[in-house]
Amino acid sequence: MLALEGVSKAYGSNQVLSGFSLTAGAQEIVCLLGPSGCGKTTLLNLAAGLTSPDAGKIVRPPGRPGYVFQEPRLLPWQTAAQNLALGLRASGLPEGERRSVVAEYLERLGLAEVAGLYPHQLSGGMRQRVALGRAFAVDPAYLLLDEPFKSLDVGLRLDLLRLLLEEWQRRPRPVLFVTHDTAEAALAAQRIVVLGGQPLAVREELALATPPAQRRPDAPEVHQAEARLYALLAERLSTD
Amino acid sequence: MDLMRLDNTRSGPAGAGRKPPSRRRGPEAGAILWPLAGVALLIAAWGGLAAFYPPILVPSPLQVLGELGRLALGGRLWPALTITVARLAFAFALGSALGIALGLAAGRSAVLEALLRPGMGVAAGVPPIAWIALALIWFGTGSPTPIVVALLVTLPVVFASTTAGVHAIDRDLLAMAQVFGLRGVALVRELYLPALAPHLLAGLATAATLTVRIGIMGEFLASDTGVGSAMALARTQLNTAQVVAWVLVALALLWLSEGLLLGPLARRAAAWRTEP
């Protein structure tokens, strides 16, 4: 289980969080929606341990996080394969095992052909695949996704979402998935949390019954969730 | 001097075969041809000057070459060169290592940077000739004086370029490295050094030039051995051709440091950029 319990965080006089709580169960994908700049990235950074809270407690499953940022954040001087292996090198995995894990993820993410290329030689979608692979490869105890498919076109976005769900299906774990895309949330999440306000508060929660891997884009449940989210977000826009 | 252009434009045949043929010369041919033409121009100008002035003021290129040959055959060139190279290499290696280590530490700690900056400012700001005068008092004539002076001049240059490089490193990449557990030596090797390379190589190139210039000046004024000291001796004997011959030796040292050390380093650091 991944949990933020009564967490407070301020930047200067800007109180982003005050006694905020959020939980993702041991096998739960939680999507976070909310207006830009409301503090969603701060939530992920707190969960990852990149920032420490002013008050409150963060409970993490034992092990490393896998973090996929808005931008790929690849090392420009390393090849796709080297970038993908970064977390494995950091954890000191022996080279033989590292090779086989890297080969597996290059294959699974459709990167085998470009393994030896540098980030500037890859397309935006390819770069984000490498970033996904880097996060998956460390066999993370929990996954943090910060609008990872934001700058990609719809087809690519669905492709990568499918890869993400496949990976999660193989090894379910807590996932915090920040997105602005209502369709993405309705497809991927078991629970959708709509956030807003300052300090940040949970405005609404939506649970979806069908397991994400079995969900189809045209299922009524997905449509209903999407419509509800759309209405909520539109309403927020008019009242916030 | 060549040392100042450690860019990646000369490295590797990037895209050489893909560009449509044009009337302009390719980068490879131009990279060799134009510098050679520049050197020829310099020698021609020197020869022209030498024709108008007596050899004691401006010796001709041929006279200098003859003097260089005599130094080499007479067994004076190699001992002087060996000791100078040893001193300068030592000063450069120590100055660079200290500059990089302190620069990395200061780049990551504002307190340490604030503590070190005044000292580096003094090392860089005091005229080299004053350091020579002081070192002469402290160490007398011998190897320590040129070494210490060259060290004092290179250290702040490498330090400044390293801290500037650390400040320029992408914070997002550092956060990524932290999340994925990259620490210590691995963090320096995989992230800091490659990210610093452009800053660092520019700093090292300046430091190498300074090491040769200031180190030989130190030998000239405060040593009985080495290229600088031999130059001083030739001057007292009014052997201008030999003074210039030693100058050529000093220039050769700079070219060697670029060709054997900094050039290959720069090409290696920039290899990923030149991939099409």
Image: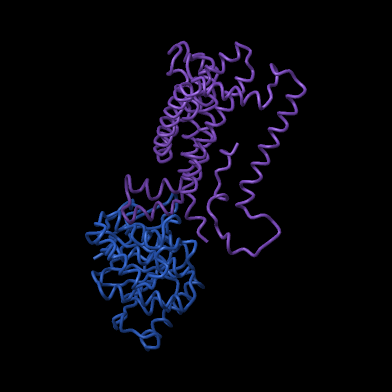
| A158 or A88, nearer to the observer | A88
Q: In this rendering, would A123 be left or right of A163?
A: right
Q: In this rendering, would B250 be left or right of A11?
A: right
Question: Where in the figure is residue A44, as x and y percent of width and height?
Answer: 36, 61
| B99 or B205, nearer to the observer | B205
Question: Where in the figure is residue A122, as x and y percent of width and height?
Answer: 47, 66
Q: In this rendering, would A86 be left or right of B253?
A: left
Question: Where in the figure is residue B197, as x and y percent of width and height?
Answer: 47, 45
Colour style of the rendered protein structure? by chain
User: In the image, is residue B203 above or below residue B194?
Assistant: above
User: In the image, is residue B19 above or below residue A153?
Assistant: above
Chain appearing in purple on the rendered image: B
For chain A, the rendered hue is blue
Residue A93 occupies quadrant: bottom left
User: In the image, is residue B167 above or below residue B95?
Assistant: below
Question: Which residue, as the protein is rendered here, is positioned at the far left?
Answer: A62
Question: Which residue, as the protein is rendered here, is positioned at the far right?
Answer: B52
Q: State the residue at coordinates (53%, 15%).
A: B221
The quadrant the N terminus of chain B occupies is top right
Question: Where in the figure is residue B24, as x and y percent of width and height?
Answer: 69, 56
Residue A210 occupies quadrant: bottom left
| B5 or A175, nearer to the observer | B5
User: In the image, is residue B137 above or below residue A96?
Assistant: above
The total number of labels drawn is: 0
Q: In this rendering, would B43 be left or right of B171?
A: right
| B213 or A220, nearer to the observer | B213
